[in-house]
Amino acid sequence: MKEYVFALLFLPTIGVQLAQAQSTASSQKESSFDRSQDEQAIRQMITNGISRDHYTEDIIFASGAYPRPIVGLDNLKKAVPSGGERKNFKTNPIIERVEVAGSGDMAYAYGTSTISWEGKEPFEVAFLEVFRKKGDAWKLAARFIRPHQE
């Protein structure tokens, strides 16, 4: 009987301690993950311009130019023709923050930019972009752009 009572009191304590140790080891591994290379890769993508080759198939695109978000790469290609009416398109992003998830497979970037193209006066926007890692490459999963109010 004593062994039974001892087991009921002692075994749950061991289980809790093991779970805490595993959780601590996991969070130490997560915090030691070096995100600087991923952050730099994302900053470079934004600065150089992100081609459609680097979009996910299920991308979400929302901007003031369209009445509702566009979901999916095929729909985006139909709604926003590549190189269409925006000749000499220029942007100069100022990236304020890039955060990579502890898992290393998701990230977001936030910043502002001045956008212009032929026949359009330059205007300021804020952007928020979400990235998903596929293999070793980052892909743009969502882009939200909003012009600053005048």
Image (cartoon, helix red, strand yellow):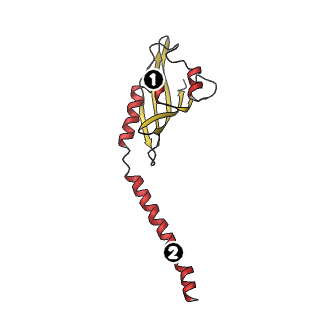
Taking the view exactly as shown, the residue that stands out farthest to the top is: 119
The residue at 38%/31% (across/down) is 44
User: Residue 8: x percent and y percent?
Assistant: 57, 80
User: Residue 17: x percent and y percent?
Assistant: 47, 70
Q: Amino acid at mark 2?
A: Thr
**Disc 2 designates what residue?**
13
Q: Nearer the viewer, residue 28 or 144?
A: 28
Viewer can see residue 63: no
Relative to residue 103, is residue 3 drawn left or right?
A: right
The residue at 63%/27% (across/down) is 68
Q: Nearer the viewer, residue 124 or 22?
A: 22
Residue 141 in the image: above or below residue 16: above
Whichever of labels 2 and 1 marks the residue nearer the N terminus, that label is 2
For label 1, the SS is strand
User: Residue 21: x percent and y percent?
Assistant: 44, 65
**Disc 1 designates what residue?**
114
